Amino acid sequence: MSKFISTALIGFITIILLAAPAQADERYNPVKDKMTIAECGACHMAFQPQMLPSKSWKKIIGGLSDHFGEDASLADKSVAHLMGYHVDNAADSKWWGGKFMRGLSDSSAPLRITETPYWVREHNEEVPQWAWNDPKVKSKANCAACHPRATKGDYDDD
Amino acid sequence: MKKAPLLFCAIAALSLTIPEMAQAKYVQAQLLASYKPTAELKAFSADRGRELFQSTFSGGKPDTPSCTTCHTADPHKQGITRAGKAISPMALSKTPDRYRDVKKVEKWFRRNCKSVLGRICTDQEKGDFLTFMLGQ
């Protein structure tokens, strides 16, 4: 019986230790879907789907022919695949809710990650205007300009 | 004896690269052949391709009046998208793995012609453009 308890204890501690790095502040699952990396990543960083609710992804991926003023249209089959991946991994896809759902009402569907209350809170006070104006940054969509490991889902560098 | 593996490697590498390069050339020739020049012009021209690449248009999206908006005026240089991501140079000599996938080339012509010119490009325009870039 004591052996059982010690085994259980070791197991429990292992689980906690393994889970700890995942609890580090700003870590997200890196994008593993090949089509997402190739198609979305051709023009901008392939943003992690956890950064917007599924309602947002439905609007964005459903309207690629006018994607922020750009024609980003794709074949229907590709659109269906991208939609599935993004909706399955969206900020509201898990019961515990994602950070990016904070401050968002159930009905809201922002089209930009930079419009979510969570993103705004994390950047507004911390990042001065001159940093945004740096020509190397060019756009708020260029996460990797300041977060060099952004594509790996690691934004823990601020 | 010691040189044998090296020689073997060299031959192996050559036998891999030569058909690969030949295949790329073949695919690029096929790609070009899939476009038809108009009856008046009869052929493609690198000069017309350059002009198309460097011209400013008013029919497309206001953010992208020219190919050079994102690709820069020099096809040998790296470009940058509006979202801040680097675009590898358009010149074939700088980016040898370009212009190998017909579907990919067609996808970008479709999207970018609409963004820049506000319409799809003609076969003549695509052929001129490719002739210019393949020779750069």
Image: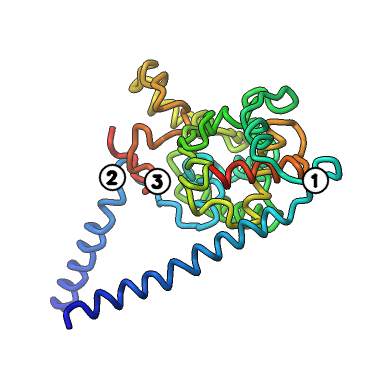
Residue B90, placed above or below residue A4: above
The amino acid sitting under disc 3 is: Thr
Q: Is residue B60 left or right of residue A113?
A: right
Residue picked out by circle 2:
A24
- Tell me where residue B34 appears, x and y as whole percent: 73, 56
Measuring 49% from the left and 30% from the top, which residue is drawn there?
A114
- Tell me where residue A54 appears, x and y as whole percent: 58, 45
Q: Is residue A4 left or right of residue B96?
A: left
Decide which of tag 3 and tag 2 comes sooner along the chain: 2
**Quadrant location, the N terminus of chain B:** bottom left
Which element is circle 3 on? helix
Q: Residue furthest bottom?
A: B1
> Quarter-wise, where is residue B49 in the image?
top right
Residue A151 numbered tag: 3
Residue B42 numbered tag: 1
Measuring 68% from the left and 58% from the top, which residue is drawn there?
A77
CA–CA distance between discs 2 and 1? 63 Å
Crowding near the residue tagged with mark 3, few <14, some 14–19, many ≥20 C-alpha atoms within 10 Å = many
Residue A105, placed above or below residue B95: above
Of residues B111 and B123, the one nearer the viewer is B123
- Tell me where residue A99 appears, x and y as whole percent: 43, 40
Chain of the residue displaying label 1: B
Q: Are marks 1 and 3 on the same chain?
A: no
